[in-house]
Image: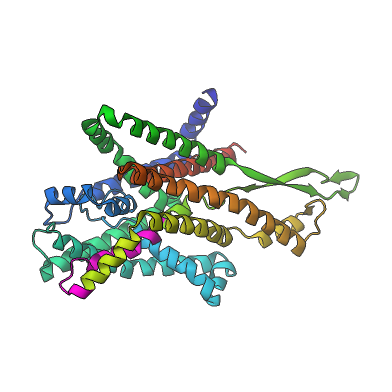
Amino acid sequence: MDRLIEKIKLIANDAGLRKRILFVFAALVLFRVFAAIPIPGVDTARLAEFFSNNQFFGLLNIFSGGGLSNMSIVMLGVAPYITGSIIMQLMTVVSPRLKALYHEEGEAGKRRFIQYSRLLTVPLALIQGFGLLILLARQGILLGGLGSFDTIINLAVIVAGSVLLMWLGELMSEFGIGNGVSLIIFAGIVSAIPSVLQQTLFTFSIAQMPVYLGFLLAAVAIVAGVIAVTEAERPIPVTYAKRVRGNKVYGGVSTYLPLRLNQAGVIPIIFALSLLLFPQMIVNFFVGAENQIVNTVAGMILAVLQNPIFSSLLYFVLVFFFTYFYTAVTFDPEAIATNLQKSGAFIPGVRPGHTTTLYIARIVTRITFVGALFLGIVAVLPLIMKSITGIAAFSIGGTALLIVVSVVLDLVKKVDAQVAMREY
């Protein structure tokens, strides 16, 4: 407790860190204001009924930061930006030019790469926004239907809202603290807690007590597991060579290189969910179409995508894949080996240079397997609980809990790093 109080005092006394935290807070408040402004012509009663009966849109609502549940001007949230980022990252595998741009051209190359992701956000927001409007009009939620002028205005507002949130997220990452996109999703989840608790109290019954206790135990296990895996490290011993300058001897110090068990953090969960939901959103556009063949095919595809066993297996595979993929994109063993060699450091028993690169890469591959396996199991656990109990809120609540815990841990680490840097 004393350590926590001391840390709070350090944050309060540090003007730079205080400004960063206040900037994030102000940006999130602005986001919540936008999320409370609905687009015109929405039947709120039918909207609430639609969301209560649709698990898919409940999950999609997580990515919108809660903006989709009341058809706000930021109803798509950061989903188009996340989808655009995934597409660009995957393109580095098939395009040598994009791979070189991201990995070999330094900060200028990465800035251009991110700019491509931003540009891709606009057409994706147009597609997703138009599809949502069609679907909601079919459900009778849009009072004015799909009149040409109203549709153009609403679509322009939705796309502008997505671009605005993308910009707000990047501002938080640059001038605030933590990952701005993750913080937007986090804020949307946290803002929904009061209404979820209220709904739980109103619908609570003694007969469901074992089910709620089971969910509570699973939630505690998820929190404990995520913390354990996030904090776990694989230390690699490192020794600095002795150097004699005049009468003084430098180096000869032994330390270690900490490799995190889960290098990717919460990003694989967000990427996997986004990729899992995007095809369902596209297929939903065609369900209820006037053409009977299109309607039948769309219904069959949607039934497969929403099958509990298939969706859980696909979710697990996507989380596992993106854990490895994102680690490979962000973690560069060759750069670490080069820096060790330049600083006169080496791993005992391993030759400097290419051999060190292979050694570090081999260890990262092994520990990432454990992290990816755990993250995949934890991700599908709420879906399994939903299949057993039949309560759809478990799948949504479990996924939200996983994101919240991961974002909080990442934020605490970033704050600790800022505090430590200013102490020295």
Q: Is residue 26 visible?
A: no
Instruction: Name the image quarter holding residue 134.
Output: bottom left
Residue at point 51% right, 60% down?
321
Foreground pick, 79 / 48: 48
Residue 282 highlighted magenta (yes or no): yes
Instruction: Name the image quarter holding residue 249.
Output: top right
Q: Residue furthest left?
A: 144
The correct choice, above or below, for 120 with respect to 140 in the image is: below
The tally of labels here is 0
The correct choice, above or below, for 236 with respect to 362 in the image is: above
Q: Quick one: quadrant of the C terminus?
A: top right
Q: Position of residue 217 (x, y in %)?
A: 43, 33
The correct choice, above or below, for 216 with respect to 158 in the image is: above
Q: Is residue 273 visible?
A: yes
- Image color mode: rainbow
Q: Position of residue 179 (x, y in %)?
A: 45, 50
Residue at point 12% right, 69% down?
149
251 to the left or right of 178: right
Q: Position of residue 242 (x, y in %)?
A: 85, 48
Residue at point 12% right, 67% down?
146
246 to the left or right of 108: right
Residue at point 57% right, 70% down?
105
Foreground pick, 343 / 257: 257
User: Magenta part mainly helix, strand or loop?
Assistant: helix
> Over which residues does the magenta segment extend?
273-293
